[in-house]
Structures are given as structure tokens and as C-alpha cells.
Amino acid sequence: MLPEILYPFISIGALALCFGALLGFSAKKFAVVPNEKAERIKGILPGANCAACGYAGCAAFALAVAEEPGIYTYTTCPVGGPDTAAAIARVLGVEAAAANRCAAFIKCNGKDENVKRNYIYDGPKSCIAASQLATGGNKSCAYSCIGLASCKNACPFDAIRIVDSIAVVNPKKCMACGKCVAVCPKKLIEIVPNKNRVRVLCNSGDTSKLVRANCRAGCIGCTLCQKACEAGAITVKDNIAHIDYEKCTLCNKCAQKCPAKAIIGA
Amino acid sequence: MNIILMFVSAALINNYVLTQFLGMCPFFGVTKKVDAAAGMGISVLFVTTLSSVLTLVFYVYVLRPLGLEYLQTPAFILIIASIVQFVELYMKKSLGSLYSTLGIYLPMITVNCVILGVALINTRYVSDEHPFLEALANSVGAGAGFLLALVLLAAIREKYENHPDVPWIFQGFPLALFSAGLMSIAFMGFQGLI
């Protein structure tokens, strides 16, 4: 009677005791000092793990800046904005990285009123699928936003809406993580500083004749804006105007001059 | 020769995931990306090799002489859990980069049914000529088969992830179930190999 109870008790008990001692001993021997700064920075970060900073997630970013604060002078958390940047800088004891709030911007005004439809599209609701077809989507302009919401579906912050069959970004919700930039098959999306509100609302590389035929709001590459700009911020290259956001003084002269109304003013 | 056959049998013919249907949770849980699947597979290969030998030692030299075979499940779980904990502690200190790769998968292995299944099946070999060698071949085969199944499914899932031709009702998990079923049928083709 006794062995039947005693043997299991002793054998399993001894096994558990051995392993307990081994684990207790090894926990002391292999103890790792946790990085206190990294833990504090991780607490400050938003925890969205969107990887917009270029690291695998918030924990990876926290560890990287804690171990090497020099990184922080040029990389910061674009999602957290200036408050988070300042809080992390306090933990690190360095100057806050310049955290300009940026947002995605879709360089197209191919609304239903401005473009025509080449054919009726009834395929999968995906810009990637539609862009494989003839003329790259059913809108008359081959550069136009297809409006099938691939960017909207990719957005983790619910910042993109489809209005009049083009995508529109809400800059208040946008965290500039760049997921939509990667997904857009037309390469229409750009990350732009929020304060630079003078922008070219077109991405067409077509000549003026083709643009006029296909879209009522497209940039025709006439260079009037380039001549009007006193700060030298605008260059017209490959039939499309580009604004240098560093040089732009938000004077609005280009927007007033543009005959196609392809530049939006501040 | 027999040992090699046992390895092939455990890895392909009686693949623990695709023909015996053990370890389904990591099979679907961590097969979204090939790197993660490979990390999980290698962790399981490592732990199952280590734990199956130790559990068999305990079974042969303690449980069987005392007539306590009925205690094998709790005893094996105890041993596996302790080994996983120990390996985790050791890795964190000495193999930092490997730890950060496997980090989240290691604790999950404690309750992985492939590892307990291998340990329990290994007790069949105690009356054979070389029980430990056979158990080792079986466990390494089981781990390799698990790694293979995970990496294969992850590679398939990566291919059709975000593919526009997939109807939305099949996107993600449902199509993973279909793929796993087809893989299982394919692995049945190994039946006549030995």
C-alpha cells in the first residue's frame, strides 16, 4: 500500500525539485540586466508597431535609440508627433529630433467630373488588379487614381476615403507611415509636410494635348507656375510641375497663374 | 539503416503535422511569414531533440522500474516545461540574436503537442535493441518534418497573401485550411516510400 503512494510522490517530487533548483540557479547565473531606458521609451511610444520609423516595431525602435542616442537626431516616431519626440528626448537627455508632422498626399484630381471612363470595370475591387488591364484602369487618363481603395484598405489609421472615385487623405488622421505609398500601383502618393499646403494635384507625364483630351484638371506642363514663382521652388520636368517644399514660401502665385487649376493654394 | 528509415518515416511518411495532425496551432498560427515559420520550426526541432531523450531516460530508469508508467504524461510535461525554461534563460544570456528571433515562440513550445506526442511515442521503443538511438532518430525526424511543413505552408500563404484573384470570403485563414488539406493529401503520396 505504502509504495504505491510513496514512489510516485518521491519520484515526481524529486524531479520537480531538481528542475526547480536548476532553474533557480540558472535564473541567477544567466540574469540579463534589462535596458531601463529602452523600457521607458517603449512606454512613451504609441505601440502601433507600424514600422514607420524604419524599425521592426516600437520595441525595436526603443532598444535602438536607447543603445545609441545618436540615431535619435535624425530618426523619430512620425506617429507620435512632437509630444512623443520631446518625451523621448527627455529620457535620452538629447535635443529633440525635428518632428515635422507629415501626411500622405494623393497627386491626382481625376474626379468623375474631370475624367471620362474608357469602359465599365466589373473586376475585383482592387487597384492592383484594375491597373493590369488595358490603359491601366478604366479612367481616360493612364496616370489617374483608379479609386478602388487599395490605399484605403492598407491604411491602419482609417485616414483615407474615396470621394468622387479618387482617394482623399485626411491629414489629421494620417500618421505618414507610408503603407499606402507602397501599395499604390500608380505611384500617386507622396509623404508631404502638413505645413506645405501648395501642391500640384496631378502626376501625369503626358504632353499637354493628351492631358487636355483626357482630364479637365491635369497639369499641362506650360511652365507658367515656374515663371511666376519668385522663390524658384517650382521646376517643370517631363510635362509635370514639381514643388520643392523646402523652398516654397506659400505665396500662392503659382496657384493663381495655373490655367488648368492643377495647383492647389494654401 | 533502420535508424535512417526511422528518420525518413518520422519526417515524411508519418509527418507529425500533415499525417498525424499534431501541432495544428503553430501550423496555422505562425505560418504567415516564412522567417517566423522557420524560427518556430527550428525551435521545435531543437527542443524536441533535447526533451525526447531526457524524457526517455526518466521513463527507462525511474518510471518503469517503479511501475509508474501511468505517470508519464505529467512527468513528461514537467520535463519539457523545465527544459524550455532553461533553454530560454540560457539563450537570453548567451545567444542574444537567436533569442530575439525565437523569443516569442519558445514559451509556446511548452504546450506544443508535437513535442509531448514524440515523447510519448518514443516510449514504444524501450524494448528494442537501441531505444535511445531510435528515439533520437524519431525526434529529429519529427522536428525536421514539422519545420518542413511549416515552411512549406508559410511559403504558399505568402504567395497568395493580398492576391486580388482570391475571393474575399476565402482570404486569410480559410484558404490556409484548404492549402493544409491539399498538402496533407500530397504527403499521403509518401505512404509507399519504405
Image (cartoon, coloured by chain):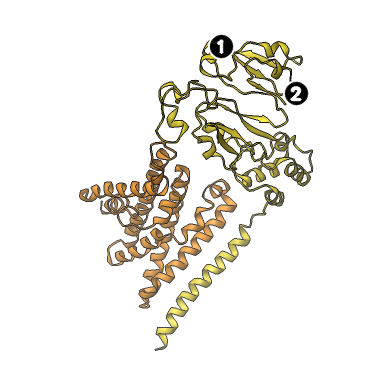
Chain colours: A yellow, B orange
Residue at horizontal 70%, vertical 36%?
A: A71
Res. A180 image quadrant: top right
Have a look at marks 2 and 1 and say if they share a chain. Answer: yes
Residue A161 - label? none
Instruction: Decide: is B53 above or below A83.
Output: below
- For the image, the number of numbered tags is 2
Instruction: Decide: is A93 above or below A218.
Output: below
Instruction: Kindly identify which residue carries mark 2.
Output: A250
Residue B181 visible within the image: yes
As rendered, which of A104 and B15 lies closer to the eye? Answer: A104
Left or right, residue B82 beside residue A41: left
Which chain's residue wears label 1?
Answer: A
Residue type for callout 2: Leu
Instruction: Decide: is B174 above or below A232.
Output: below
Find numbered disc 1 in the image and state the secondary structure of the residue it sits on. helix
Residue type for callout 1: Ser
Instruction: Kindly identify which residue carries mark 1.
Output: A208
